[in-house]
Amino acid sequence: MTALALCCFIAPAIAAAPEKAAIYQIFTRLYGNDKQVNKPWGTVAENGVGKFADIDDKALADIKALGITHVWYTGVLHHASVTDYSTYGIGMDDPDVVKGRAGSPYAIRDYYNVDPDLARDPAKRLQEFEALIKRSHNHGLKVIIDIVPNHVARGYDSVTAPDGVKSLGADDNNQLAYSKHNDFYYVPGADFQVPDFGPKDLPLGGAKAPGLDGQFAESPAKWTGNGSRSHQPRVDDWYETVKINYGLRPDGSHDFPSLPADAATWNTTKHGAFWRQQDPQQLPSSWAKMRDIARFWLAKGVDGFRYDMAEMVPVEFWSYLNSDIKRIKPDAMLLAEVYDPSRYRDYLHLGKMDFLYDKVGMYDTLKAVIQGRQGTDSIGLAHEAVADIAPHMLHFLENHDEQRIASPEFAGDPRKALPAMVVSSLLTQAPTLVYFAQELGEDGSEDAGFGKPSRTSIFDYVGVPALQRYRQAKRTGEASPADIAGLRRYYQQLLTLSLNEPALRGELRLLPLPANSLFGFIRQSGPDRLLVLSHFGAEPLALEQQLGPELVAEDHGQQSMILSSLLTDIDGKPIQAELLQGKLRLKLPPYSSAVFRLPVEVGASQ
């Protein structure tokens, strides 16, 4: 037995926690695709594609039952693709500047419509998405979509914009490298050239296709989405996109009003009032255009936005946009992809974001612990680095940019990540993100073409085998395979617990434990108190732990008590502990967690 004293420290004070949320990210074109061909670089006819209609009432009820509050529909907006929809009046994109055959969902071609791949009738694609929003709402699910503020597709042309709305770049003076009222940056005097593709980088894998000729007409060339100023971007640049100008001069200086020094203490109402007082001519033209795009989707019933690469756009723009969104819809969820920890508080307090990715902190740390590259003590350090803003740091173990847990490149077995999933979900009031089919153990092993194994491709037409097996079982009424059923049941227990337990809305106490594979903490709100222990090791761990006097009242401990974990293990078996004379005794199976409700007597004297 290992005897461990549970001495506690209280995490630094944090701002009032937002309501707990659980977000299910669906890569929309893949969700309902039941074809199992998965031919590399396969066409939509060969490999298939999912539709809005596939996310029907049964699917939404199943997602809601998982313990989900929000659905993030990824890849909804009309983006560049090699698939021909010219019979619907949609011009073809040039494959020389499209990644994959289906195209990147972050190379937006028209902000005022949705992708034709996703509709049974492409002519009515927007109406079909509106119906999906309504279905989602009927199941108590809020809807998030992407806004990609930093860049758009090279062939951007908003042909379906409302009357009077001009497309980005329509009024640009493209003879100027920079102007505040240009929507794009230019390379005057130089025509765009496609990258110098090597044999492994050829568009469509070297296959022949209409328009694939090594040329793309763009004169003068525009800056590339990742900031490349060359008329010929590199293969590893975001060559399929062009960067939007938000009033940052080429030398990095700002060409727009600055926020006052005390703006970090303002609420969104005061931020909005500040921008309405400014002369519109002093603001870059792109600001109002992007604001109107957000307003358009709010009017369609969208409940929030995930902002792609938000840190590549000045924080003042976010103050301008987000204060306008909150004026229209105060409960809108605003989630930003930001990777620079030194800027986190600016984007929260000045930019008025609700949540930021906790990627370079908690995600990277948990991945390292799962892979055995770090000990569990590093988890507490990752939390402490953002303790003051912890409820606003989104936790996840998968998303469209990251490797699938079950892939050999990550863990090779979805069970190995379950302790991290418990920590990620229960440590703070921050939202929990689950990527579709994560709860089914999808390994992302398909070689789809542009996308590479370990990540489910976002560029290609491809199926998701674990999800396909699960959906087939649901349709036929058959039992899901035991491994899928047990894993999903575990996720369902965990997410439901994270949303409903009062103790998880309160104070956090981290438990410094010497066992390198063990991480523990207590969450408390009033008399409700939960003890969480997560074991990341591959061998069973027997524990005999003396609870400190700050956890045990003097009159407690004379009678043995059996505590049952609120989480069963992946096989459905309960984990129990004995509490006797201040000692907690239990045995944790490999890759397991226990969540114990401490009896009222414990800590009652505090």
Image (tube, grey):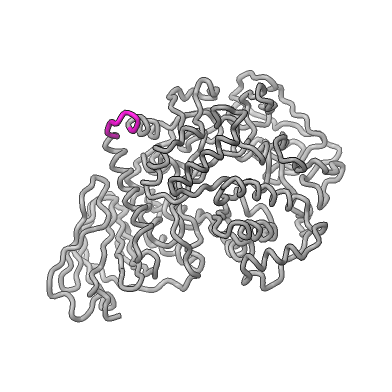
How many discs appear? Answer: 0
Of 384 and 348, nearer the camera is 348
Q: Is residue 82 left or right of residue 555?
A: right
Q: Is residue 116 above or below residue 289?
A: above
Residue at (54% x, 57% y) in the render? 356
Of 528 and 175, nearer the camera is 528
Across and down, in percent, residue 550 comes to 29, 78
Q: Is residue 518 left or right of residue 446?
A: left
Across and down, in percent, residue 442 comes to 39, 37
The answer to whether residue 451 of the structure is visible from this angle is: yes
Quarter containing the N terminus: bottom left
Across and down, in percent, residue 575 comes to 21, 55
Across and down, in percent, residue 580 comes to 15, 70
Of 501 and 10, nearer the camera is 501
Q: Is residue 152 above or below residue 576?
A: above
Residue at (37% x, 32% y) in the render? 471
Residue at (82% x, 37% y) in the render? 220
Q: Which residues are magenta?
A: 474-480
**Residue 113 placement: quadrant:** top right
**Residue 149 within the segment the image draws in magenta:** no
Quarter containing the C terminus: bottom left
Residue at (38% x, 59% y) in the render? 426
The answer to whether residue 154 of the structure is visible from this angle is: no
